[in-house]
Image (cartoon, rainbow, N blue to C red):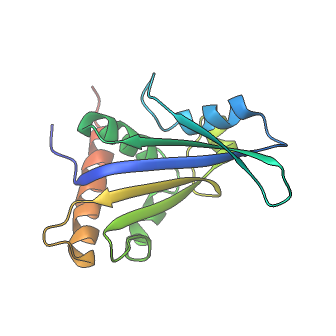
Amino acid sequence: MASVPFHYVDLRTFSYETEDEKRVEAALRTFLPEEFEVERAESQGHHGDRIVVYSARVERADDVRYVLARVAAAPDYDRIFDELDDRITDNCELFLRFDKQAAFGGEIRLGDGITFRAKVEAYPAKREAAIENAREGLEAVEGDADSPD
């Protein structure tokens, strides 16, 4: 299996006082391999309301591949390719946001609620190299997702 041109993927979402924490965690887990550890941290909003932050850092190549395959399942995956120039920073990071409610239902689509940040391998660490590497990596994952097992 080809290497993945990403050092890691960070996923994060928030559970506000009006939301069911288990559902919010389940939405985040839609992107993660089974039994993957999710960190939970409690915080407080400006008005004293409780906010729970769920996050996961995916570093193992097979796990990163799994997360990227989930992203490749998004119906608006082509849009991610079209916007790569706008979604990769000068620090070689790919940023995406996904719909938390859709993720709870098992569907992956761009929206609000779940933040995805991936550190793209690029040598030298230049934005242009990161864009090209991300494009190649995402195309490879999409190809793997399309091929039968």
- Out of 25 and 134, give the one closest to the viewer: 25
Q: Is residue 88 above or below residue 6?
A: below
Q: Residue at x 16, y 45 (%)?
A: 3
Q: Is 134 left or right of 81, judged from the image as shown?
A: left
Q: Is residue 112 above or below residue 50?
A: below
**Position of the N terminus by quadrant:** top left
Residue 130, position as x, y percentages in the image: 25, 69
The image quarter containing residue 15 is top right
- Out of 64 and 69, give the one closest to the viewer: 64
The image quarter containing residue 23 is top right
Q: Residue at x 30, y 42 (%)?
A: 59
**Position of the C terminus by quadrant:** top left
Q: Is residue 80 above or below residue 28?
A: below
Note whether residue 120 is visible: yes
Q: Residue at x 57, y 51 (%)?
A: 109
Note whether residue 146 is visible: no
Q: Residue at x 33, y 77 (%)?
A: 90
Residue 145, position as x, y percentages in the image: 33, 39
- Out of 47 and 130, give the one closest to the viewer: 47
Residue 74, position as x, y percentages in the image: 50, 48
- Out of 19 and 105, give the one closest to the viewer: 19
Q: Is 143 left or right of 17, judged from the image as shown?
A: left
Q: Is residue 127 above or below residue 27?
A: below
Label total for image: 0
